[in-house]
Amino acid sequence: MCDVTPTVLVYADLHEFEGEFPEIYKQEWESSKSVDAILELLSEVGERTEFVATPSELLEKLKHYSDLDFTKRPVLFHLMEGFRSRNRESLIPAVAELFGFPHTGSDVYSQNVSLDKNLTRIFAQSIGIPIVPGFLIRSETDFTVSKEFSFPGFLKPSGEGSSLGIGEESIIHDEKDLRFKLSSKPAEFFPYLLEEYLTGIEYTISVIGSDVVGYRVSSAGRLVLREELKVEKVYGEKTKSKSAMPETLVFDCPSGLETFLQEQSRLLCSSLGTSGPARLDWKLDSLGNPYFLEMNLTPGLSPFYSTFPICYRRSLGDEKNLLQEILKIARLDFETDRFLYAKKKIGSLSSQR
């Protein structure tokens, strides 16, 4: 245990970590190089950092720092991705809220909604945000294709990120093709989401803020797969691996479209009550109409390749500004009623008898 109390306790899943689980489960995990860079940047803006990488290490630190006054406790910097759980991106917020620690990123509710692509679609549609027609497939046989659905479609796991489970075979030509491809899909990736396949340009936008401070929205970055490094025709699992990253962003979105994407992205974040960083992905159809695809409330923060910082740097600030803003929001959120239970229910039942 360090002698000086940290102001920031960073929890990250490292891609280099070796464990008794498949390599593919680490698809969203961050590289050691990226986490080291984030730790260095935090130090440069005046934070005292400590790093943990496993649940048991985190438990030990929380037990130790729980003796501190709430105003002195370190911020839990949320870089955890986990695997094989629909709650995996909400575990840090849940622990922080229960035991009374400030944390970066959104709360449990927002994290769980955003990780479920189908729930996010339902929420977005409920507030008037355009979504492409689609439906949830819970098993390879338990579904019905509506007569209104137009093929080709695009098939993706409803609860995974980093394009996990997505590749060129995700393009579905008809119902027969759908049933054939579902029969070979791993059970662990169900449920799947099938949406009508959009052939237009894809954009990504970074949003940062909270209900307390309001929301700031970046320029829209157009996703481009560089031909010399392209490993597949779609933005899939191979593209988003740590070993091959041919994607780049170009900031040439037409002003009218960009304003629409920015306004709709802000609306979705404010309506859901997100906090800290959020990355939202949009895609155009063949006529140029924009549709919301998905959002990520635990976006990669690598200064080397993650799209959230790229968009942020373009129009909102540099990497140091980004980390300072994330921590400012976390500390202000800690003053809200969401943390009252942990702060007020102290002592023990026996001491009250």
Image (tube, grey):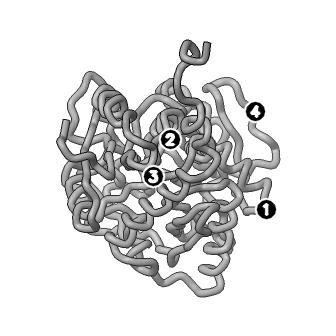
Helix, strand or loop for disc 4: loop
Amino acid, disc 4: Thr
Q: Which element is circle 3 on?
A: loop
Between the residue at mark 3 and the residue at mark 4, the CA separation in whole angstroms equals 40 Å
Q: Residues within 10 Å of mark 1 (few under 14, many from 20)?
A: few
Image location of residue 271, percent across then percent down: 71, 58
In front: label 1 or label 4? 1
- Identify which residue, 265 or 353, lies in the foreground: 353
Which callout, 3 or 2, points at the residue further toward the start of the chain?
2
Question: What amino acid is at disc 1?
Answer: Gly
Query: How many residues crowd around disc 4 within 10 Å: few (fewer than 14), some, or many (20 or more)?
Result: few
Image point (38%, 76%), residue name: 313
Q: Amino acid at mark 3?
A: Thr
Residue shown at the point (68%, 69%) measured from the top left:
264
Tell me the kind of residue under disc 2: Pro
Mark 2, secondary structure of its residue:
helix
Identify the disc placed on residue 284: none
Q: Which residue is mark 4?
A: 144
Quick check: marks 4 and 2 in contact, CB under 8 Å?
no
Earlier-in-chain disc, 3 versus 1: 3
Q: Which residue is mark 2?
A: 93
| Number of residues whose C-alpha sits closer than 10 Å to that of mark 2, classed few (under 14), some (14–19) or many (20 or more) | many
* Image position, residue 339 (x, y; %): 58, 43
Counting residues from the start of the chain, the first of labels 3 and 4 encountered is 3
Occupied quadrant, residue 322: bottom left
Bin the neighbour count of mark 3 within 10 Å (Cα to Cα): few under 14, some 14-19, many 20 and up: many
* Residue labelled with disc 1: 128
211 or 32, nearer to the observer: 211
Q: In this view of the protein, which residue sits in the foreground, 151 or 156?
A: 156
